Amino acid sequence: MTVATRRRFLAAAAGLGLTLVGARRLHAETATGCLYANCVMTREGSYAVAVFDDAGAIRALHPLPGRGHDVAFEPGRGLCVAFARRPGTFAVAFDLVGARAPEVIAAAPGRHFFGHGVFTPDGALLYATENDFAAGRGVVGVYDVRDGWRRIGEMPTGGIGPHELVWTEPGRTLAVANGGVDTTPEAGGRTALNIADMEASLTLVDVGAGRVVSTHRLGADLAQLSPRHLAVDGRGAVWFGSQHFGDPTELPPLAGRLVPGREPELFALPEEDAPRAKNYVGSVAVTADGGTAVFSAPKGSLVFAFDTAAGAFLGTAAVSDGCGLAPAPGHDAAVFVSAGTGRIGCWHPGGADYAPIAGEALAFDNHLVRLV
């Protein structure tokens, strides 16, 4: 960790008053036993990971040295890793029990994080999407959890600008959303440098062999459609949400499904709803029963859903700045939605309307994770 990052981390820790109680106690005190995590900004402008319960009550805040994006969770030991928003170079590891001090993981020289990562099923390794910005290529960094988060290697993602990654075959194959957008820290880290010649893709990576085993593109007419976020349904299909970098008057399908061994399918919103999404999907989740894929479009304050079996459109809900999505407690076909406004709510696509359940003096960032 750099001196500046360490100072920011210590300052953030000093400024947060909530600490985490033991995970077993916290778990037992919730109505359904469910806990969630979301990167947040506090009213004082500091950054943290909030852990909250099934009633939406904040139970703990874990400090971050800068803005976070997503949280990877390893249930075996209750480990969490919060990743910096791109082009950040830090990740912070902490455990739900609070038995050990948080650890800051620094990106390797010449790399930065893209905000997402996953653990192996046995909890031994952590995989993170990263930018090899000098070469203009995406990689998956590999970290040894039991050896102080030591970076032990990397493998290519087969594309540019990798964002979220998920297991299609746990421990064996990762799906990666290569958004196709080239960025560099020198250009601010978020400015797209190659819109005219983007090459987005969805790839499947064999982690044992360290190589891409299949590459899927959306077609030449959709070259500026950038897949970013992923979730796996009950049948093993990967649902993806995209962002469009082309003419804003164009309204390409923002939702899609990749079944291994087939080409991607795209699913369009109804004509009257498509403009509301603002060509931007911020998060994707699948309900606990695996039957519904839910997408958030925070720029349009919209969430929408498709049935995972038939691909049928299930409807929309209006959620101001709603982005984070995760399976809801107590209902296999509903999701929790967290918002930049500080609101947490529940939506049952095709059933009950969106219902706020809590509001906090926190601004929730893009991704919500169900822990237990």
Image: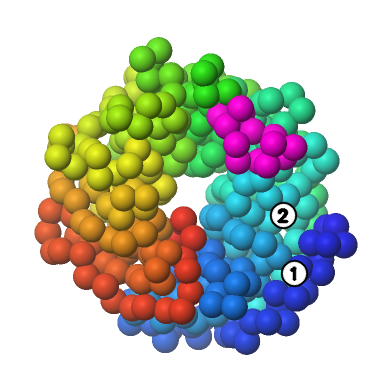
Where are the magenta residues, as a range? 181-193
Residue 178 horizontal/vertical position (percent):
53, 30
Query: Residue 100 vs residue 206: left or right?
Result: right
Q: Quarter-wise, where is residue 324 in the image? A: bottom left
Query: Residue 64 vs residue 166: left or right?
Result: right
* Image position of 343 with respect to 322: above or below: below
Q: Secondary structure at mark 2?
A: strand
Q: Are marks 2 and 1 in contact (CB under 8 Å)?
A: yes
* Image position of 164 with respect to 367: above or below: above
Residue 90's disc is: 2
Front residue of this view, candidates 211 and 218: 218
Residue 99's disc is: none
| Cα gap from disc 2 to disc 1, whole angstroms | 10 Å
Residue 98 horizontal/vertical position (percent):
65, 78
Residue 10 horizontal/vertical position (percent):
77, 74
Front residue of this view, candidates 344 and 60: 344
Figure quadrant of the N terminus: bottom right
Looking at the magenta stretch, what is its main secondary structure? loop
Query: Residue 225 vs residue 305: left or right?
Result: right
Question: For mark 2, does the 10 Å Cα neighbourhood hold few (<14), some (14 to 19), or many (20 or more) residues?
Answer: many
- In the rendered picture of this protein, how many numbered marks are placed on residues? 2
* Image position of 86 with respect to 322: above or below: above
Instruction: Decide whether residue 186 is among the magenta residues.
Output: yes
Q: Amino acid at mark 2?
A: Phe
Residue 9's disc is: 1
Q: Secondary structure at mark 1?
A: helix
Question: For mark 1, does the 10 Å Cα neighbourhood hold few (<14), some (14 to 19), or many (20 or more) residues?
Answer: many
Q: Quarter-wise, where is residue 255 in the image? A: top left
Instruction: Decide whether residue 320 is among the magenta residues.
Output: no
